[in-house]
Image (spheres, rainbow, N blue to C red):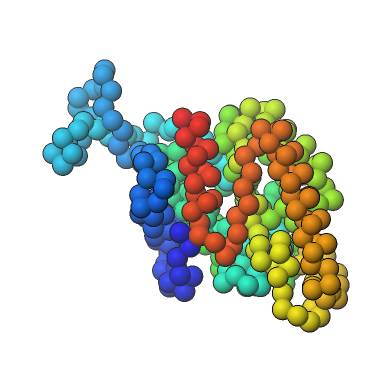
Amino acid sequence: MLLDPDLLTQLAPLDLKARTIVEGFIAGLHRSPYHGFSVEFAEHRPYNQGDDFKHIDWKVYGKTERFYVKRYEAETNLRAHIVLDVSSSMYFKHFAEWSKLRYSIHYVAALIHMMHRQRDATGLVTFDEDIIQNFPARSSYSHVRLLFSELEKLLNGEQKKSKQQRASASAKALHKLAETLKRRSLVIIVSDLFENVQGHEDLISSLRHLKHQKHEVLLLNVLEKKSERELDFPDGKFLFEDMETGSELEVIPAQVKEDYKKKVAEYTQKFKIACSEAGVDFEEIDTQSPFDLALLAYLNKRKRLS
């Protein structure tokens, strides 16, 4: 659910915003055609034969007349590493209220909140031209606070750093991550894939590398579709600037729109096919749309792994 950006901006700190996003999403989920989708958070799990009776939560039984066992920190279901692109192109916005980075930070925060409630171990990796931060996957409360603190720093520095030119090198970062992760994990990549029209094969190679290391991969391509996919600008001449190199190009969108859309659609389709062949789940996430699709992509992936 993409709540009113002004409302979310007024909420602080980031963990409160994340909880608001997740609760809105779950409420919408139960009202939607996805009703019945299991969103079982892991503060408790159903009692199984052989479980110790001392772990039964009798307060929950009193309310539900069902036996649930309290879950403890050691009962981690999943190890996940969220890989966030923080390169200069992620600061872009034109029609959307939020930049791609601000949207992605809130989405990642919501993911961390969901994973923590499920007692999943969560790690966070940030990158541009190389890996910047690499926090290991853990499930403790103190670790989650550390991740939220890092995301808060990114939010606070968004305006200050938006004019810097920092290229992205997704393939390089993912190859390095594949060599670093020693335990089988779910790797969730959140990026606009800005540099990879030319580096298509390198990126696919890095995704295959992660798969070869037995990791599951969910790739979320964050973009502002109205501008970046549809080139839906008003009539007139526009000066487009590459946020990662500073190069400029003067364009009349109406003159190139149809050819541009055709070429982008062809490239995107080829990329989707390559991801599918590599065993990678791929979703496009529009910054003018609700968070629902991206959160559902994660839940669907997690359900298949359980």
Residue 270 placement: quadrant: top right
Out of 304 and 6, give the one closest to the viewer.
Answer: 304
> Looking at the image, is 25 positioned above or below residue 46?
below
Residue 172 placement: quadrant: top right
Residue in the picture at 42% in, 67% down: 12
View extreme (top): residue: 50
Where is residue 173 drawn, in percent x and y? 72, 45
Residue 204 placement: quadrant: top right
> Looking at the image, is 9 positioned above or below residue 168?
below
Residue in the picture at 71% in, 64% down: 230
Quarter of the figure with the N terminus: bottom left
Out of 68 and 53, give the one closest to the viewer.
Answer: 68
- Left or right of 113? Residue 211 is right
Where is residue 30 drawn, in percent x and y? 35, 49
Where is residue 174 drawn, in percent x and y? 71, 42
Residue 179 visible in the current orientation: no
Out of 44 and 151, give the one closest to the viewer.
Answer: 44
View extreme (front): residue: 258
Residue in the picture at 13% in, 39% down: 62
Residue 10 visible in the current orientation: yes
Residue in the picture at 46% in, 30% down: 306
Out of 266 and 23, give the one closest to the viewer.
Answer: 266
View extreme (left): residue: 62
